[in-house]
Structure formats: C-alpha cells, structure tokens
C-alpha cells in the first residue's frame, strides 16, 4: 500500500468503526474471549440508515466537466470478460496501490476498503502505536530489490529494540548475521519496506508500518540520537541501523492471530555453535542448485566414502553466527 505526495481525504461522515473500537478495545492485558471474533475491517451494523454529510463547496480552482454535446449519449467504455475495469483518477487519493483499487472495483469491496482506509490507516504513528512498538520483541520485515524480487525476514531483540525516533520515523538495529545482507541489499536498491509486528501474548493484535528505509551506521545514528540503548546484555552490539520514514501505519486485526505463551529460554545470542543455531535443519547443504555444484560426501584416506554416509549433509563449522538475512 503506497501513495506519495498526495493528502488523504475521507469526508464521508457516518458512524465509524474507530468510534466503536475506541469504546470497547482499550489494550489492558489479555484480550477477552468475546473479542477474539471481532473483525475490525468488517462493517458494524447500526439501527437506521447511514447518514452522509455534504462534502462542502468545491475546492478553489475546481471546474466541472463540460456537459456532453446534445445528441446521442456517450457510450461507456466496454470491459472484456475477465478483465479488471479501469478506475477513474481520484483527486484526493486514498492509501493503497492502483492495483488494489482496481481489484476493489472489480470484486465489489470498494466501500469496505474505503472504510478501512478512513478509520484505520494513518500516515504516522500515534501514541498507542508508539506504546505498542515499545513492547514488541520481534518483527517481520519485507523488502524487494529493484526488479521486484522479494524477501521477508525476522528481526528480534529485547522488548523495545525497535526505536521510535519521532511519530514519522522508527529504526531497528542490524546485528552480525550470516553475511548475506539480503534485506540491506534490497534496501540499497529499493527503499520501500513493510514491517509487521504482532502481539501474540496480550492483546492479540498486529501493526503494519510501511515506509522508505535507509541504512545508517551505528555511530552515525548515535551522534543524532543520544537516547539509543547502550546496554547490550544479550551479547549483541548493533553494527548499523535501518531507519524507516513512515508512510502508512495500520492495524492487523486479531481474527486469525493465535494466542501464544512465552517460555523462559536461555538464548546463546552470540554463539557460532552450529547445533545451537539449527545447523543444516532442512538438509539443503548437499543438494544441487543452479549457482553452485553439489558437494561430494567426505572421503576416507583411501578415497572411499565414509561408512554409512548417504547424500545427507554433515553440519560443518563454517556456518555463520546468525541465520537472519
């Protein structure tokens, strides 16, 4: 969902989902069972007809379209079966891509989508979103290179490892990993990222943050923001930070979010031990791939394979310290 350089305008005034939610959904610990079925993006029924307020006078410089010439009425554009109908340009563009707007028109979900844009999507982080981010200990980050090839990765740390620098900016640390730098490489070509944070324990709710990212060295960011954490009790020190300029922030409803229970666990954050990191869990090491030849099983001094050795890989000591990309 991206829109750049245009203000959002939702002047339709009827009972909003946000008004009802404000009265019933204040995060206060574990979510009640009856709230787990609530679908925030669905309409909420209310007695009587919906009211629509007038939109007011047209903006300065507005000129109505010329009336059609007398005679035969114009023929509307025809859409071939199976094709998505075109969407007329909107002078006050809503959030979202042109593709999602076309599909909303094709599948008849425009009203629901507009209600969600109006009630739930912001161009910044509000106070409740900032509080939510401050207690998250993991996030899913989506990125793509200049050709649109996508990658999704998990980022984790102590609660509050994602820092809100101001309502329009957040940053998360990049630690020593496997050296691939897939996410950072994508950002160097294409700054657009999507971040999803989910509370699986208390309120069973999620927060999407979309925006433009840049990579900043740790020392450079600390020179601008002295309040960044300095106690690295987990044995990890940030090498650099991803700083995201927020373009969209919106809810991920709780309808299908499972409830999880945290369990105390001793995590060897800085280890290079292969088994502690998961080793070759998916048995990928010895398989053929287009960019490198398959690895041969190790041989004894006489040139014969080791007894009992099949094509499955043997975990080695050359694995990097962290599986994150």
Image (cartoon, grey):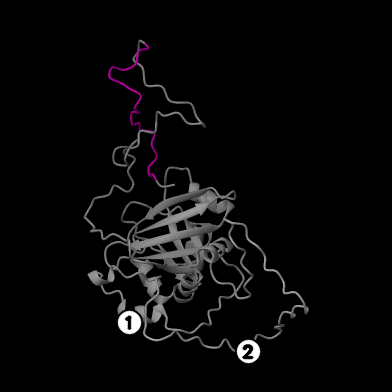
Q: Which mark is residue 86?
A: none
Q: Residue at x 53, y 51 (%)?
A: 144
- From this viewpoint, is residue 11 visible? yes
Q: Residues within 10 Å of mark 2 (few under 14, many from 20)?
A: few
Q: Nearer the viewer, mark 2 or mark 1?
A: 2
Q: Residue at x 38, y 63 (%)?
A: 229
- Comparing 120 with 271, the one in front is 120
User: Which range of residues does the magenta coloring cover?
Assistant: 303-323
Q: Residue at x 49, y 47 (%)?
A: 182
Q: How far from the left and from the top, in percent, is residue 236?
A: 36, 52
Q: Horizontally, is 63 left or right of 165 in the view?
A: right
Q: Horizontally, is 114 left or right of 319 in the view?
A: right
Q: Quadrant of residue 7?
A: bottom right
Q: Is residue 307 magenta?
A: yes
- From this viewpoint, is residue 121 visible? no
Q: Which mark is residue 23?
A: 1
Q: How far from the left and from the top, in percent, is residue 103?
A: 53, 62
In space, the residues marked 2 and 1 are separated at their CA atoms by: 33 Å
Kindly give the residue lying farthest to the front in the view shown.
Answer: 72
- Mark 1 secondary-structure assignment: helix
Q: How far from the left and from the top, in percent, is residue 64?
A: 71, 82
- The answer to the question of whether label 2 and label 1 lie on touching residues, with beta carbons closer than 8 A, is no
- Mark 2 secondary-structure assignment: loop
Mark nearer the N terminus (2 vs 1): 1
Q: Horizontally, is 244 left or right of 18 in the view?
A: right
Residue labelled with disc 2: 57
Q: Residue at x 33, y 28 (%)?
A: 314
């Amino acid at each position: 969902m991206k829109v750049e350089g245009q203000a959002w305008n939702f002047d339709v005034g009827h009972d909003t989902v946000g008004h009802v939610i404000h009265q019933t959904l204040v995060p206060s610990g574990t979510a009640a069972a009856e709230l787990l079925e609530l679908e925030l993006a669905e309409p909420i029924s209310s007695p009587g007809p919906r009211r629509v307020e007038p939109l007011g006078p047209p903006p300065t410089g507005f000129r109505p379209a010329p009336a059609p010439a007398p005679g035969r009425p114009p023929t509307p554009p025809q859409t071939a079966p199976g094709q998505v109908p075109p969407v007329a340009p909107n002078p006050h563009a809503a959030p979202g891509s042109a593709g999602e707007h076309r599909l909303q028109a094709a599948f008849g979900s425009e009203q629901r989508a507009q209600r969600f844009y109006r009630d739930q999507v912001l161009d910044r982080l509000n106070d409740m979103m900032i509080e939510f981010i401050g207690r998250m200990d993991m996030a899913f980050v989506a990125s793509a290179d200049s050709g649109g090839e996508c990658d999704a990765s998990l980022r984790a740390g102590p609660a509050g490892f994602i820092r809100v620098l101001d309502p329009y900016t957040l940053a998360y640390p990049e630690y020593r990993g496997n050296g691939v730098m897939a996410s950072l490489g994508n950002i160097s070509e294409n700054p657009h990222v999507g971040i999803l944070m989910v509370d699986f324990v208390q309120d069973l709710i999620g927060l999407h943050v979309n925006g433009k990212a840049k990579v900043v060295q740790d020392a450079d960011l600390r020179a601008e923001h002295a309040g960044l954490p300095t106690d690295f009790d987990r044995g990890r020190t940030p090498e650099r930070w991803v700083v995201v300029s927020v373009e969209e922030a919106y809810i991920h409803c709780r309808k299908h979010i499972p409830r999880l229970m945290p369990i105390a666990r001793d995590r060897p954050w800085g280890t290079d031990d292969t088994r502690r990191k998961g080793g070759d869990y998916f048995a990928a090491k010895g398989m053929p791939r287009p960019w490198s030849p398959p690895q041969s099983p190790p041989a004894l001094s006489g040139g014969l394979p080791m007894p009992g050795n099949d094509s499955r890989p043997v975990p080695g000591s050359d694995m990097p310290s962290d599986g994150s990309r």
